[in-house]
């Protein structure tokens, strides 16, 4: 959803490729990144999707997380345009980096 600052209402954004909960999200410049979480079948996923602000659809990223991660501990973006996610619920707990 996006908040229209002029009229102060919420408007729908494009529908996700696959339903998701407990995912990690962040933005790098004008790209929103959605990573991991639980899919529509309540199973951990390694899917990474991106949405360019103003675009009409989400796209699958060029790569997925190396592990399925149902509950992500957090994510940050950096000044040098990197998205870093902390995977806390997988056999290989770890920190992974994505550069869109």
Image (tube, rainbow, N blue to C red):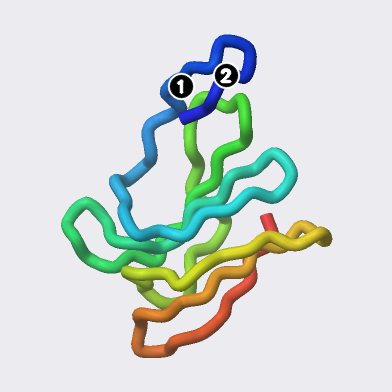
At 42% from the left and 23% from the top, the residue drawn is 12
State if disc 1 and disc 2 touch (CB < 8 Å). Answer: yes
Secondary structure under tag 1 reads: strand
Residue 4 at x, y percent in the picture:
57, 19
Q: Which residue is mark 1?
A: 10
Quarter of the view holding residue 80: bottom right
Assess disc 1: are there few (<14), some (14-19) or many (≥20) residues with their C-alpha within 10 Å of its C-alpha: few
Quarter of the view holding residue 36: bottom left
Which comes before the other along the chain, label 2 or label 1?
2
At 62% from the left and 32% from the top, the residue drawn is 53
Q: Which residue is mark 2?
A: 4
At 37% from the left and 72% from the top, the residue drawn is 69
Q: Which mark is residue 55?
A: none
Question: In the rendered view, does 3 fall on the left or right side of 10?
Answer: right
Residue 2 at x, y percent in the picture:
52, 27
Question: In the rendered view, does 15 fall on the left or right side of 76?
Answer: left
Compute the Cα span from label 2 to label 1. 6 Å
The vertical placement of 44 against 10, above or below, is below
At 35% from the left and 70% from the top, the residue drawn is 71
Quarter of the rendering occupied by the C terminus? bottom right
Q: In the orientation shown, which residue stands out farthest toward the bottom?
A: 92
Q: In the orientation shown, which residue stands out farthest toward the left?
A: 41
Q: In the orientation shown, which residue stands out farthest toward the right?
A: 80
Residue 99 at x, y percent in the picture:
69, 61
Q: Nearer the viewer, residue 27 or 60?
A: 27
């Amino acid at each position: 959803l996006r908040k229209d600052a002029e009229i102060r209402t919420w408007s729908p954004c494009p529908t996700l490729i696959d339903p998701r909960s407990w995912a990690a999200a962040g933005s790098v410049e004008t790209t929103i990144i959605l990573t991991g979480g639980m899919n529509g079948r309540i199973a951990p996923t390694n899917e990474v999707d991106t949405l360019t602000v103003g675009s009409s659809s989400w796209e699958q990223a060029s790569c997925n997380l190396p592990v399925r991660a149902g509950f992500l501990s957090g994510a940050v973006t950096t000044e040098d345009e990197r998205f870093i996610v902390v995977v806390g619920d997988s056999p290989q707990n770890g920190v992974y980096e994505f550069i869109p």
